[in-house]
Amino acid sequence: MLRTIGGMKSLKLNLLLGSFTLSLRQYADFLELLKSGIAFDGSGKKIPKEKLDEMLDEITKVREPYR
């Protein structure tokens, strides 16, 4: 079902669910942060590089079937 909604509807749904959508600049900065391997959580604890790599892979890896 969600595959059939357009971009604007998905942004509105995201907003209604109490979330926000990153701007293109924020998204690019987030990817660079993941690639750097150095990031900290809200408590100031360093996030393990393996976890950052896992997150980056989840976002960028090409999978079958295409999603």
Image (cartoon, rainbow, N blue to C red):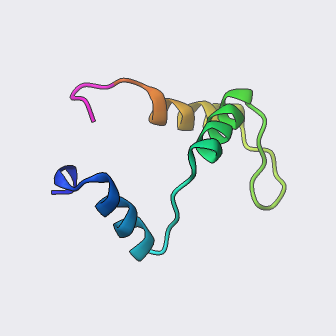
Closer to the camera, 61 or 20?
A: 20
User: What kind of secondary structure does the magenta stretch mostly adopt?
Assistant: loop
Give the residue at x 41% y 66%. 14
Give the residue at x 55% y 33%. 56
Is residue 66 within the magenta segment?
yes
| Residue 46 in the image, given as x and y percentages of width and height | 80, 45
For residue 14, side relative to residue 9 (left or right): right
Give the residue at x 80% y 61%. 43
Which of the 4 image quadrants contains residue 50? top right
| View extreme (front): residue | 8
| Residue 31 in the image, given as x and y percentages of width and height | 62, 35
| View extreme (right): residue | 44
- In this rendering, the count of numbered labels is 0
Give the residue at x 21% y 56%. 5
Closer to the camera, 2 or 42?
A: 2
Q: Magenta region: which residues?
A: 63-67
Looking at the image, residue 17 lies above or below residue 47: below
For residue 65, side relative to residue 51 (left or right): left
For residue 41, side relative to residue 22 (left or right): right
| Residue 15 in the image, given as x and y percentages of width and height | 44, 71
| Residue 54 in the image, given as x and y percentages of width and height | 55, 34
Which of the 4 image quadrants contains residue 34? top right
For the C terminus, which image quadrant?
top left
For residue 48, side relative to residue 53 (left or right): right
For the N terminus, which image quadrant?
bottom left
Looking at the image, residue 13 lies above or below residue 7: below
Closer to the camera, 24 or 53?
A: 24
